[in-house]
Image (spheres, coloured by chain):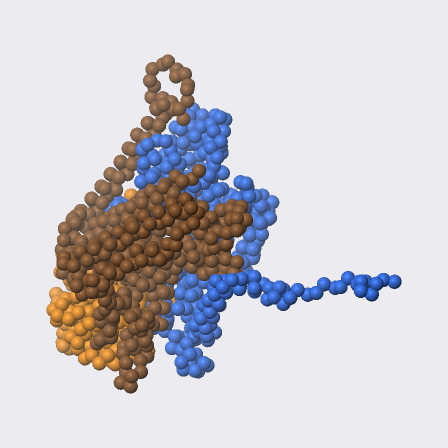
Amino acid sequence: MSEAYVRGAILPPLAPPVSERGVVKWMRENLFSGWLNSVLTVLAVLAVYYIASLCLPWLLHGVWNAGSLGECRSIIATNYGPDAGGACWAVIHARWYQFIFGFYPIEAWWRPILDFALLFVALAPVLFSDNPRKAAIMVGVVSVILVLSLMALVPWWALLLTIALMAGLSFLSYTATSKLLWVAAVYPFLSVWLLWGGSVWGPVMAMAGFGVMVLVYRVISPGLGVIMGTALGFVAACIWWLFLGSLAAAAIQSVVPFGLTYVESDRFGGFLLAFVIGVSSISISLPIGVMLALGRQSNMFLIRTLSVSFIEFVRGVPLITMLFTASLLLQYFLPPGNNFDLILRVVILVTLFSAAYNAEVIRGGLAALPKGQYEAADALGLDYWQAQRLIIMPQALKVSIPGVVSTFIGLFKDTTLVSFVGLLDPLRGVTTIVRADLAWKGIYWEPYIFVAAIFFIACFGMSRYSMYLEGKLKTDHR
Amino acid sequence: MKKSVLLGTLAAAALVAGAAGATTLDDVKARGVLNCGSNTGLTGFGAPDADGNYQGFDVDLCKAIAAAVLGDQSKVKFIPTTGETRFTSLASGEVDLLVRNSTWTFSRDTDLKFDFVAVNYYDGQGFMVKKDLGVSSAKELNGATVCIQTGTTTELNLADFFKSNNITYTPVNVADDADAERQFLAGSCDAYTTDASGLASTRATLPKPDDYVILPEIISKEPLGPVVRHGDNQWGDIVRWTYFALVAAEEKGITKANVEEMATSTQDPEVKRLLGVEGDMGKMLGLDNEWAKRAIAANGNYGEIFEANIGMSTPIKLARGLNALWTQGGLQYTPPFR
Amino acid sequence: MAMAIETPKQGFRLGMLIYDTRYRAITIQVIVLLLFLLFVGWLADNTRHNLALKGKDIDFSFLWRRAGYDIGQHLIPYTNDSTNFWAGLVGLINTLVVAVLGCIFSTILGVIFGVLRLSKNWVVARLMTVYIEMFRNVPLLLWIILVYVILGETRPQPKDFKAAADGTQIATMNLWDSVAVTNRGTNLPLPLLDRPLPGGYTSALAIIIVLIGSFWINHILSNRAKATQEATGVRPVMWWKTLAILVLPTLGLLLAMGFHLEYPVFKGFNFQGGINVAHAFTALLIALTLYYASVTAEIVRSGIQAINRGQSEAAYALGLRPGRTMNLIILPQALRVIIPPMISQWLSLTKDTSLGIAVSYLDLRGTLGGITLNQTGRELECMLLMMLIYLIISLIISAVANAYNASVKLKER
């Protein structure tokens, strides 16, 4: 017999008090943990409510199908009363392609789309160098999107060809990711050809210039040494590019004509233009940036001074003055009678601009390397270029990728400034043209919001990637 | 990697450099395309449509010149220019010709080394205000806020006008026509000043045009016309006389529709000379004798171009006014084709 | 790469210029110098040719000719009779005003937002994340245009502030009838002195001297308080002394000189009196501030997160409250990580003031590199001058900031 006052069974635990469980606890801890926190919470909620109450009705009253701004307004007035405001998304519906492609001819849209997809294929081995699975996933996803977006644009046989090509590339990216580096090597020439069109032999012969360089180097370096070999190889390649290449291209073209319709630079606009300027500038500026970064660290006084002055000069002036230089001054500095088009001039100046920024990023990467790496290279008896090529640069560049990505994000956003020199950027250039149409005169918010949304998606994605990379690099080094 | 392309282009540029010093006409013929500096967003005068084809009063003049020089009005490439980059594009040779409502002024003609070869639109700077402001004269605008486009002659005229009338104003600088319209509509400025033609076209497209008035004062002379580089007189002559051919065509009643017929049937010796039936006028310009015929056939005579782009039948609704022929009380007058 | 190699005892050969490390550096530098000079000469020759072709010359005398245009915002006396040089100076001052105010505001806001982003408050932290990502990932140009359009479209017109016949007003002024934000600008009260000291800027100078004096005395007092605290462990109550010393002398001087505010009043078309700040300025400032605050917030966040967790744990163990931990332990250490990227943000902000072009703000680019360039056609001269000025500003900022950075670094152990 047990005593009556002794409890025989353990009581089930009571539920925690209301203030210590569930939503209430979470709110108490996270939202109202002190007076300051409570005030902040209330303020934040009020701010969200205020902004939402301003924007939501306008967004919800949006009209997607209308022929003009006036029509939009009358639809909104009949649906929601005469005083209601509403978005007129019809302008996006009617002119979206201009924001994306500018005036690029519709029958050639597949070219920039394919080019854009191939960019990811070319980047895959660089971005996911040690993870073939991720590289393959990326290439695969890009392929699917590419095929879907090409469906309405190209005939069935071309679509099948694309599917075959992309399937092959996806397979390659999984089995031998580093083989895709060849795609990356060919990509710049392929890209120029796809975007501008014309004879295929021009880009091929430009590529052949590198072959000439290697050939001359191979022939000469055993006899005269590495330095003379490199120098003569470079000179030979220059001669090829300047004189022989174009002749050879013309000759082959006359025998085996093969090419795409030529698209003039002034048809480029919208995000296509932003992409062309951004990607070409960053890719050309990378090697220049490497040279400048090395020059800045060099112990040769003259080279250091030149590099530092160039970098500091470019970083000291606003991009917009560089663009005005491209538009107003570059013609003065180049030989009389030259006829560079504005896009090329802008690309040159933006390249110089981003080269200075990339140089600083790469210098950061070089500085992050422990001194032992340099000493080890010296101890192995490697000369300067061998050490750079085999030991220093592979590591420094890897560390620099996040920085280069953020330079690219900044550059991509800054391509909107080209509208000030008369190019059709998505933000102001195309919008101005759309507004010059009587049907859409007086429209403001909708194009801006559309463009902002695309910029946000692109830049947000890239910055997330760069953060992922930073995280990965951090664990590598600790 | 793309450096090679760059180098290639540099090389091409170096080769082209050897050809520098050739006349603009030779350049255009060699290129096969006329580069024409244009507006990008001035409805009625120069703006691309939804397909990227440029349309407008100034644009049609470029097309006529392309037709005269190259035989095809589609062989013209419109280079978009802004108010700030237009003269440099011309000076640097990027465009052969600038038709972008540019005002003929002394300093542009002399100091900037350009030639204004003709006036295709006589304009003047005016003011537009809201009706309920209760202003009937620009001289009552003391203390007003005035929207004005930067990079134009209008801002200098504005300063001069207010100064000479001893009244003050606050300038609100705007980047382009569309921005000015937005600000003016929102009431960010009391008055909007620009060329009267621009005011009329802006007013015509406002939601309630009758709520706005254009004040009677025209405070400046704005002769707008095609501009070429100083020093290449042959090219200047071609542009000038192509334009005059369009005006003469209107004077003589030659239209796009009847130009072929006129060429065969006319008895008027001047028309015969103009259309290349008689004489060697084209040869004197460095072109062939049918140049004017092609220019007229492209988009019609001056009056037709005017009516099609900015005339009363368009939403812009500009009256001919000063731009009527001299025979009808206007200023458009062509020297004789003789 | 100086290595102790027994140099072979043979005469100088040409090949040694390339293969001997003693000479190679010199050879390379000489070649580079030659190439560089050739390149510069090529550019200069092209420029000379091109100028000759266009019948132009390089001539800076246009700077001393009449500008002929008006500038809405000028902090130094300016009329359209002033010279182009003076117009450029007005523009430079406008650039600097936006840059300085933008740097100050964006830094303050950025620090607050960066700290708030790490807040434990879920709503606040999320809101800050959304704000930061939204601003960072959309071009600055778009924000400038958007803020400008918002200010112009949502604010009432000046005439709405006028009382109608029946006494009703559509819009009212803010802050006790002293500030009016219309759709064309912000009207602020203008500080005026009834009895200013004789001479141009003497009154302002007097105020500055008094302020410096007050701060100096305050500095001495706080040093003394610190000494007392270290000696006795008790910190004397300071706040009312500080307040009195900082405020009273200046206040007294202002009262003696008859300080008052001139309020903007609606008259004619517009508000008259007071200071009228155009929306071009306001929009540029707000957009730059918000954009760079979001960048600064990220810098601050990563700076704070770079501090070892042990530091804050140690502070909590000592019994410091979270606020004081942040102020006394975390921020001072994070500052060293934060300052270098912050300097480059200030630099970028200064350069990005040139985006005022989108709202036609007449800064250095708008006057010297805009209207003057356009009206005189001197693009080479104007552009070179403008780039030079921007370069000088940037170099000054980075020099000052680097000096400060060095002084912070010295304290590292």
Q: Horizontally, is B240 left or right of A151 in the view?
A: left
Q: Colour of chain C?
A: brown
Q: Colour of chain A?
A: blue
Image location of residue A141, percent across then percent down: 56, 55
Residue at the outermost front position = C232
Residue C123 vertical placement versus A200 (above, below): below
The chain painted orange is B
In terms of depth relative to the viewer, which is nearer, B210 or B13? B210
Residue at the outermost top position = C9
Image location of residue B37, percent across then percent down: 27, 60
Residue at point 40%, 26% (across, down)? C1
Which quadrant does the C terminus of chain C fall into?
Answer: top left
Question: Would you say residue A51 is visible in this rendering?
Answer: yes
In terms of depth relative to the viewer, which is nearer, C47 or C255? C255
* Image quadrant assignment for residue B164: bottom left
Image location of residue C64, percent across then percent down: 14, 53
In terms of depth relative to the viewer, which is nearer, A107 or A438? A438
Residue at point 49%, 38% (across, down)? A395
Residue at point 49%, 64% (across, down)? A35
